[in-house]
Image (tube, rainbow, N blue to C red):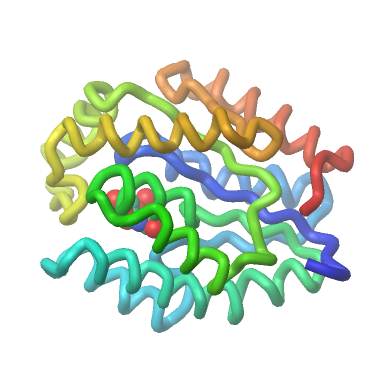
Amino acid sequence: MKGRTGHFITLEGIDGAGKSTHVEWLATRIAALGHAVVTTREPGGTALGEKLRAFLLHEPMTHDTEALLMFAARREHVQEVIRPALARGDWVLCDRFTDATFAYQCGGHGVSVAEVRALEGWVHGDCQPDRTFLFDVPPAVSRDRLHKAQAQGRQPDKFEREAPIFFERVRAVYLARADAEPGRFRVIDSGQPLGMVRQLLENYLAELDAGGDRA
Ligand code: TMP
């Protein structure tokens, strides 16, 4: 994207991998580096996107419809929030983006990779994350975390109710994408103690701040 000065960071991982624990903390660390930061999420991030999120997480629909709605929400988000923020020079910290569609809809649900690539090109071909932190844990660990959250009264959404094999497939796609794009991805073993995860994240932010890859 021409004229862009901000950084676009995305957070990814299977449900229960622990990424959401770090979102607000990461935002404070980016601010401490002296940058304005916009924290946002997908599906969601705009008024329409949040309405679509409620459908996506709770209503039954075909897998193709799911992928299409993800990209409809994403188009609003990119145009209304992400591009303007990057153009201002802000850093954008986004909890999930298109890697999640490849992982969940293609890997998990068998939607065509070629169709999703075409949608990606249309919706945000020239607006890609500079850095993606992939929080990685074996599905057995994430499942335990989700069960604990549910025992405290949190209702699982449609995706969180998927079988363990679904999350194995989602994780495999995430790891394959990280292997294919080592410049963009930083894979974090999210089973480590919180302090160690945060130290790694701190290092990765410093690397980006020092002028690491710009798209
Ligand atoms: P969250 O719980 O991390 O906010 O994510 C909501 C759910 O949406 C999560 O189960 C993953 C799913 N999802 C997809 O299936 N495809 C996508 O493209 C995105 C952004 C999220």
Quadrant in which the N terminus is drawn: bottom right
Which residue is rendered at x = 44% and y = 36% of the image? 174
Looking at the image, residue 94 lies above or below residue 4? above
Which residue is rendered at x = 79% and y = 72% of the image? 87
| Rendered image quadrant of residue 33 | top right
Looking at the image, residue 184 lies above or below residue 97? above
Q: Quadrant of ligand 1?
A: bottom left
Q: Is residue 22 left or right of residue 106?
A: right
Q: Which x, y percent locates residue 39?
A: 58, 60
Q: Which x, y percent locates residue 176?
A: 47, 31
Q: Is residue 69 left or right of residue 164?
A: right
Q: Is residue 127 left or right of residue 105?
A: right
Question: 8 or 155: which is nearer to us?
Answer: 8
Which residue is rendered at x = 41% and y = 19% of the image? 191
Please give the count of numbered marks on the rendered protein: 0
Q: Which x, y percent locates residue 94?
A: 55, 56
Q: Which x, y percent locates residue 91?
A: 72, 58
Q: Residue furthest front?
A: 114
Question: 191 or 136: which is nearer to us?
Answer: 136
Which residue is rendered at x = 25% and y = 49% of the image? 110
